[in-house]
Image (cartoon, rainbow, N blue to C red):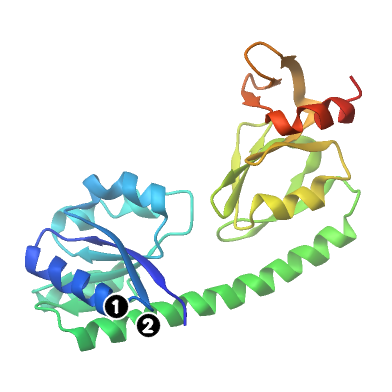
Amino acid sequence: MRIVNAIVIENDIETAQILNKFGEDNSLILNIIKTVEDIASGLELIKLHKPELLFLNANSENLSNLKRITDLDFNTPKFILMSEDPQKAYDAFKCNAVDFLLKPLDFNTIIISIYKVIKTIEMEISFQNQKLQQIDSINAQHKNNEYIAVASIDKIELLKIEDIIFCKAEGKYTEFMLTSGTKVLSSRNLGEYNGILSENFFFRIHHSYIINIKHVVKISKKEGFYCEFTNGMTLPIAKRRQEEFIKFIKL
């Protein structure tokens, strides 16, 4: 059984206390990271922790700010909406919430909702694994070719390898920076791409970055090693990788 990481967005003290008590008593399935009063004040926390679930007070302010969460560049958390008004269940349906909880909350309904979330996540993981197998097959066919298949949040994209300036670790995700200025977020971690791209002109200069040396225009040695790219950005070269990098670019 997996542990679901969640953030509670609730301004009602009693409801927040019930959820936190539930989290304490059921730590094998639920980890409540923090409780905040509204989406506006919790947005940075959501960006930082990337929770799998949000318990959300279904008041007008939160519902009007919901797009700020769905527009984030990582997998949107699952929602469990909560209200003392049963009519808000319709809003939960419109928001594709996994479930709706009527206040006052009780442990039995909370645990049923959590299991619904777990089932939904596990089904998505199963689908994602199938998609990754497809991508591995595509990349095997295109090995040493000009394209790489990338699993983004909702689709598989074929990126032209020469258009990749660098790849950046974003937690368990990878962000591709392209020459067009476009950023593509992949659901795979950076380490997996290290093996795929290593046979081309790519080098991992840092635990967070793999770069395409074809787009490096300058290497600065002032106050550490830095690469400057065709788009004007600069990235640091980790000390432990500097000697190997110099050999790689044959300086």
The circle on residue 116 is 2
Q: Tell me which residue sits at (40%, 47%) in the image.
A: 48
Pick out the residue farthest to the top. 222
Residue 55 appears left or right of 170? left
Q: Which of these two is toward me, 138 or 211? A: 211
Q: Is residue 94 above or below residue 28?
A: above
Q: Which of these two is toward me, 137 or 226? A: 226
The count of marks equals: 2
Q: State the SS at label 1.
A: strand
Residue 37 appears left or right of 224? left
Q: Tell me which residue sits at (42%, 59%) in the image.
A: 76
Do the numbered discs 1 and 2 sit on residues whose CB atoms are within 8 Å? Answer: yes
For residue 98, which quarter of the picture? bottom left
Q: Residues within 10 Å of mark 2 (few under 14, many from 20)?
A: some
Q: Tell me which residue sits at (74%, 70%) in the image.
A: 133
The circle on residue 82 is none
> Where's residue 164, x and y in %?
73, 37
For residue 4, which quarter of the picture? bottom left
Q: State the SS at label 2.
A: helix
Q: Residues within 10 Å of mark 1 (few under 14, many from 20)?
A: many
Q: Is residue 59 above or below residue 119?
A: above
Residue 169 appears in the figure = yes
C-alpha gap between disc 1 and disc 2 = 8 Å
> Where's residue 73, x and y in %?
48, 49
Residue 71 appears in the figure = no
- Give the residue type at disc 1: Asp
Quadrant occupied by the C terminus: top right
The circle on residue 99 is 1
